[in-house]
Amino acid sequence: MHFKDNNLSSLLPWYINHSLDEAERRRVEHGLKASPLLQAELTWMRRLRQQIQISPARRRLPAWDAGLDRLMQMIETKD
């Protein structure tokens, strides 16, 4: 893997979530056309994301906001 591929690799999670700006999205798409390794990593990340979304354990987890609220309350009561 080249440094350029590695740099683009770090953008893949945001590419999957459609949260890159237009210029970054185009850079990633251009890199995907040129790099089979980057394509393989994207495929792996998409499969992982899908497995996490359908995981029964994920449905049992409390909402992130609720966990953050509890943590903030604990911090505030210790001050």
Image (cartoon, rainbow, N blue to C red):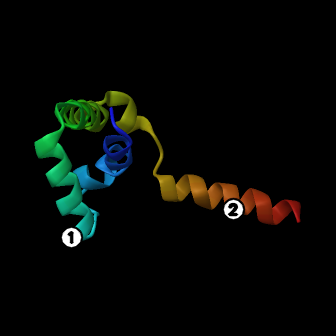
Mark 2 = which residue? 72
Image quarter of the C terminus? bottom right
Q: Which residue is drawn at the image coordinates 16% and 44% (left, top)?
A: 32
Q: Residue furthest bottom?
A: 22
Q: Are marks 1 and 2 in contact (CB under 8 Å)?
A: no
Q: Amino acid at mark 1?
A: Glu
Question: In the shown orientation, is residue 74 left or right of residue 68?
Answer: right
Question: In the shown orientation, is residue 62 left or right of residue 23?
Answer: right
Q: Gap in Å between the C-alphas at discs 1 and 2?
A: 35 Å
Asked which secondary structure carries label 1, the reply is helix
Q: Which mark is residue 22?
A: 1
Q: Amino acid at mark 2?
A: Met
Q: Which quadrant holds residue 50?
A: top left
Across the whole image, how many numbered discs are drawn on residues?
Answer: 2
Question: In the shown orientation, is residue 23 left or right of residue 72?
Answer: left
Q: Which residue is drawn at the image coordinates 24% and 37% (left, top)?
A: 38
Other residues around mark 2 within 10 Å, as few (<14) / some (14–19) / many (≥20)? few
Q: Which residue is drawn at the image coordinates 38% and 48% (left, top)?
A: 7
Image vertical order of residue 16 relative to residue 27, above or below: above
Image vertical order of residue 53 relative to residue 75, above or below: above
Q: Which quadrant holds residue 49?
A: top left
Q: Residue furthest right?
A: 79
- In percent of width and height, residue 26 lies at 17, 62
In this rendered view, identify the residue nearer to me: 3 or 20. 3
Image quarter of the N terminus? top left
Q: Earlier in the sequence, mark 1 or mark 2?
A: 1
Q: Which quadrant holds residue 34?
A: top left
- In percent of width and height, residue 9 lies at 33, 43
Q: Which residue is drawn at the image coordinates 27% and 63% (left, top)?
A: 24
